[in-house]
Image: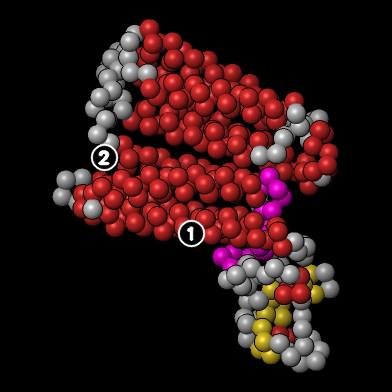
Amino acid sequence: MKKYFSKASKTSLILVLLVIIAGSLVRMTGRGMGCPDWPKCFGYMIPPTHISQIEWKPNTEFKKGIIIRYNDELIYAKKKFITNNSIDLNNWSNYTKHNYSDFDPIKTWIEFLNRLLGVIAGLATLLMVFFSISYWKEKKILVLISFTIVFGMVFQAWLGKLVVDSNLAPFKITTHMLMALVIISLIVYSIFLISKEKNKIEIKSNFIKYLIVFSVVTSLIQIIIGTQVREFIDVQYEILGPEKKNLWLNNPNLYFYFHRSFSILIFLINVSLFYLVYTKNMYSGFINKIMFIIFLEILVGVSMYYADFPFLTQPLHLILATLLFSYQFYWMLHIKKINDL
């Protein structure tokens, strides 16, 4: 079963990354509130495909929790009942968590598929727990980490509910992203613990070791600030609409300037690592991949700013940042104990 743990870990990592991409697509397309409730969607396990499915009808059975649109507002069934020829509002309560009642089937299904992908990723982490049992005698930490990952996925799902209930509150979205990075870090650590190549990397310079750790910290900060910039963009999207993308960054906030300037520091840190690793003839596989990701990230960032957010550049920007953090974190795990200078 040990060989399956490795496959389950890598599959979980890929699926979590796909969930991040899907979540970014949801926000990029303005689909973040396609489903007003959670975990169901308008009270259904399978979302509605037509507006007629969320409207009141005579002689129709409505189950408890079903949400419909009535007089341009959302109301939900307080209990299971069958309607008469006219609506009885005593059977319904106002859905007060949100003040909108728009319905777009495409918007709804994009949001639902994002949630579905999250469920699949959660099941993959359950497989990690199952297969990790084979390591109990020799590496109990793998079992503990696997259980922690599952609890993290449950907590992430709960955070997703809070995000929906808060109508995409900025602070909760940032926390949601941070939790995703914690889960990714734990999965990457699991992969590291069973890696056959983990002892083949030796970095003797304490300065380089500290610089690698610093590169991970700066990337984490950059992602956090990036979520704040993204939230600013979301506000501009709501105010100006998608047809005026050229105006979204006309008056950027402080987070944008910090994010842009901080990227220079990240670039310099990793260029320094690239130079030091090569000049000292140390293992360079990780830094090659890291520099390639940074190069792509720069291209995407420049195109977003100067070409007015071309299609898919926003989710691509986020997933590249996540991959950068993942590779840097994996490289950092290979560092042996940093000795006193």
Residue shown at 79% from the left, 37% from the top: 245
Q: Is residue 228 visible?
A: no
Tell me the element at label 2: loop
Disc 1/disc 2 C-alpha distance (Å):
26 Å
Is residue 260 within the magenta segment? no
Residue 100 x/y as whole percent: 77, 62
Tell me the element at label 1: helix
> Which of 73/281 is in front?
281
Q: Which residue is tagged 1?
A: 119
> Considering only vertical position in the picture, is 94 above or below 171?
below
Q: Which residue is tagged 2?
A: 194
Residue shown at 77% from the left, 88% from the top: 58
Per the rendered image, the range of residues in magenta is: 27-40
Residue 124 x/y as whole percent: 40, 55
Q: Tell me which numbered mark, 1 or 2, is placed earlier along the sequence.
A: 1
Q: How is the image coloured?
A: secondary structure
Residue 177 x/y as whole percent: 54, 44
Q: Quadrant of residue 166?
A: bottom right
Residue shown at 33% from the left, 10% from the top: 281
> Considering only vertical position in the picture, is 138 above or below 72?
above
| Left/right of residue 61 with respect to residue 274 in the rendered view | right
The C terminus, quarter of image: top left
Q: Residues within 10 Å of mark 1 (few under 14, many from 20)?
A: some
